[in-house]
Image (cartoon, helix red, strand yellow):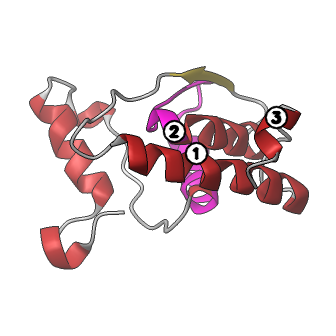
Amino acid sequence: MFSDKKWNKSEAQLFREKLIIDGVPAEDILVQDRSANTLEDVLFSKEIIYKTCTSSKNIILVAKPIHQLRAFSTFKKQLPQYNLINAPAAWDSKVDTVQYNEFRALEELKRLKTYAEKGDIAEVSIPKEFTKFE
């Protein structure tokens, strides 16, 4: 999560600006900048989706590849009536180092299990050979 103290803008606002620079019309970008975690991302986005996206049942879901499965599982559980289109973001070699991704992969495995047990996300089948790392 980007800190407001460092950038004076939310992560959502920074990504909005990047999309506009890349040619996406500003009026086509919906911004949700109240969340602090993935479940809140979905719950707060759900409000916006229900108000503004009345004619489409498709959601393009973009997240870092290491986080894509959990983001997808959260949206699937919380918005089951929508067709989710996975579009993982590109790897950023400056941020997404091997060491960082090894750590995040283990954290994601734990979170997939924990959040499914809590009912926050759709259950994900995790192969047994990966559960030995928990």
Q: Nearer the viewer, residue 83 or 73?
A: 73
Query: Given the image, on which type of amino acid does mark 1 rest?
Result: Ala
What is the C-alpha distance between the residues marked 3 and 1?
14 Å
Range of magenta residues: 39-66
* Residue type (three-letter) at the residue carrying disc 3: Glu
Would you say residue 68 sits in the magenta stretch? no
Q: Which mark is residue 129?
A: 3
Residue 82 against residue 105 in the figure, above or below = above
Assign a secondary structure to mark 2. Answer: helix
Mark 2 or mark 1: name the one nearer the start of the chain: 2
Task: Check disc 2 and give the amino acid type.
Answer: Ile
Which numbered mark, 3 or 1, is in the foreground of this view?
A: 3
Name the residue nearer the viewer: 113 or 37.
113
For the residues carrying marks 2 and 1, which lies nearer the camera in this image? 1
State yes or no: residue 63 in magenta. Answer: yes
Q: Which residue is mark 2?
A: 66
Residue found at the far bottom of this picture: 5
Q: What is the spatial separation of the Cα atoms under label 2 and label 1, in whole angstroms? A: 7 Å
Which quadrant holds the N terminus?
Answer: bottom left
Residue at 14% from the left image edge and 26% from the top image edge = 22
Residue 105 numbered tag: 1
Residue found 58% across the figure and 45% down from its top: 105
